[in-house]
Structures are given as structure tokens and as C-alpha cells.
Image: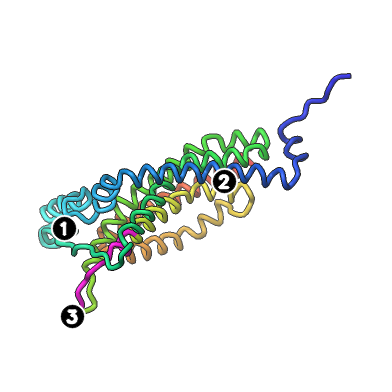
Amino acid sequence: MEQQQIGPQQEEEEMSFLDHLEILRWHLIRSITAVLLAAIGAFIFKGFVFDTLIFGPKKPDFITYRALCKASERMSDWLPGLFPSGAICIGQDLPELVNLTMAGQFSAHILTSLVAGIIFAFPYLVWEVWRFIKPGLRKQERKMVRGFVFSASILFFAGVLFGYFVISPLSINFFLNYQVSSEVLNNPTLSTYISLITSVLIACGAVFELPILIFFLTKAGIVTPKVLKAFRKHALVAALILSAVITPPDVFSQILVSIPILILYELSIWISRMVTKRG
């Protein structure tokens, strides 16, 4: 008697709830291990992580500040009456950081290493997610999400780079120079600075995953291209408000931050349209 072959979908249906939990547990264990290994590497190379990466956006010769100064000079040459020279030359004479607690620097070292571990291990984390959901997908669905790990990783790292080279320096310059009164001296702490940098990097990486999120929401029938188009104006207003909050009070910086967000939204509409056409 010929044995009937059991396909991946049938095996998935026959697995119990506890079997799924066991598989999920091992995915989580491997993911946490990858993050910890990357975090240990970041912890060991603290000189590069802190002096070069973390404190880079605070240095006056940071690439973003130099680029803005050059842009300011060129725009001043083109529009001498409307755009004064050095209008967006920022990042100069920022106050020094202080540590106010006994374990403050060690705690900052641990937190930064963990965040670095998550960022560096992100492609592996996405791969583990893919390995977990792949058995439950049909053959056609697997073809549609081919390249999921690569696309999600590229978008995440693009967001992290955008946060590091654009959002972080603009935010640092704004918050460290902002004063409600000349009677109040800005004396930023190490912990608040680290918190700002790490939160910006993770948040920007997550925001840049918008096209991936829209893909799955469209696939699930929750979002349609028509809905996304209807909210295009709202997205524009939200992008301008967000850029106004996190950037210095000048139009150039606000536009600089708004453009990538709007591009992501338009890309999400295109992705939603493609998913809808394929059914």
C-alpha cells in the first residue's frame, strides 16, 4: 500500500498548540541569543560605539553639520537677500554632558550595548520571524513575500541611518540650545542624551517599516489603496507637524525631515495597489 505524503500545510494543521509554543520558544531563544552576542560585541568596543557613533552627532565637525553649513553658504549666494549666510550652520558650541549618579555611565553603557545589539541583530531577528510564519503560508503566499527578510532589513537600516544623520543631530542641536530664559543654564546629563539617541534610532527604524506593515495589512484586507489615498493629505500634515517638533524652527530642516516620510507613504500606496491587483 502506497504511503500518502504529508505536505507542510497538513503537518502544520496536525501540530498542537503546545507544539507551536515549543517552536516559538526556540525562535525566541535564538533571537535573544543573537541580540546578546551583538550587545556583548558592542559592550567590548565601547570606544568606537561611544566616541565615534554615539557622540558623533554632538561634535561640531559632524558630517550633517558640515553639509548644512555648505548648503547655507550656497543658498546665501543664490538668495543673498532672503537667506542670510550661516542661517542653518548648527551644532556649534553645544554644552558638555554630565553624569550625576554613581552608576550612570555603566548603566548608559549597558543600555547602549543592548540597543546596538538589537540594531545589529535585526536581520537575524527578521529571519527568525520568517522561519516561524513560513510553514503556515501557502505556496503562492510564500512567493508574494519572497525577499521579506532583505526588504525589512534594508528599510530598517535606512531608517536607522536617517535617524542618525538627520533626526539626531537636528534634535540634539535644538534641545541643547533651547532656553525658556537666560536665567536657566542647559546642563544635559549623559542618560538623557543616550535616551534621545537610542529612542530616535529605534523609532526611525520602526517608522521605515511602514511599507512592510502596509503590505500585510493590505493582504489581510484591512487597508486598501483607496483608503491610503484618501488620507494622503492627513499624512502630509502629520509629517509637517512631526518635522516641526523634532527639528530647529526653520523651513529647510522641516522639509528635509518631511520628504522621506512622504516618500515612504507613497511607496506604501504603490505596494498596496500591487497587492490588491495580484489578489
Residue 151 in the image: x percent, y percent?
A: 47, 39
Give amino acid for label 1.
Cys
Horizontal relation, residue 74 to residue 130: left or right: left
In the picture, residue 141 is in which quadrant? top right
Residue 59 in the image: x percent, y percent?
A: 19, 54
* On-image quarter of the N terminus: top right
Provide the secondary structure element on which disc 2 rests. helix
The image's mark for residue 32 is: none
Horizontal relation, residue 132 to residue 13: left or right: left
What residue lies at 33% left-to-right and 66% top-to-bottom? 245
- Mark 1, residues whose alpha carbon is within 10 Å: few (<14), some, or many (≥20)? some
Residue that badge 3 annotates: 183
Q: Which residues are magenta?
A: 184-194
Residue 159 in the image: x percent, y percent?
A: 39, 49
- Mark 2, residues whose alpha carbon is within 10 Å: few (<14), some, or many (≥20)? some
Give amino acid for label 2.
Leu
Residue that badge 2 annotates: 28
Dot 1 or dot 2, earlier in sequence? 2
Q: Residue furthest top?
A: 1
